[in-house]
Image: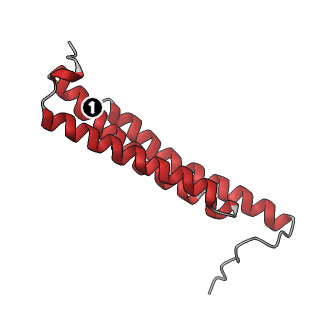
Amino acid sequence: MIQSAIDLPVWAACLVAFFLLIGSGLALIGAIGFLRLPTFYERIHAPTLGTSWGVGGIVLASILYFSLSSSRLAVHEILIGIFVTVTTPVTLMLLARAALHRDRAERNGNVPERKREI
């Protein structure tokens, strides 16, 4: 049975709040970076870092809260963290490669240089 949040010890509530604030702050930084950066290639970088690390903080807070409130180890949130950590960089790479291919085919001037193989 899950207890109320009021029944958590103060140290646990502070730790959960700390991880929630860190996670939501990192997600906010990623969203602000998405809005502020000028080009597509710069824009896709900030949200992926904010999402990965932001979700990590929120998942840690969730694990801590539900483990302490239910008096058993709650680790099913780790699956969410693993899924987000794996899918976010893969999605970033696919989006970047598709945009790069499109921009090079259209001979757009804002394309990063192609690396020369030695």
Residue under numbered circle 1: 75
The quarter of the displayed image where residue 43 is located: bottom right
Quarter placement of the C terminus: bottom right
Amino acid type assigned to the residue bearing label 1 in the image: Val
In the image, residue 57 lies at what x, y percent? 34, 44
The quarter of the displayed image where residue 98 is located: bottom right
For the point 48% across and 54% down, the residue is 29
Q: Residue 70 versus residue 75: which sits nearer the camera?
A: 70
Q: Is residue 110 above or below residue 90?
A: below
For the point 60% across and 54% down, the residue is 34
Q: Residues within 10 Å of mark 1 (few under 14, many from 20)?
A: some
In the image, residue 39 lies at what x, y percent? 70, 63
Residue 8 visible in the displayed image = yes
Q: Is residue 46 left or right of residue 15?
A: right
In the image, residue 11 lies at what x, y percent? 13, 38
Quarter placement of the N terminus: top left
For the point 35% across and 48% down, the residue is 22
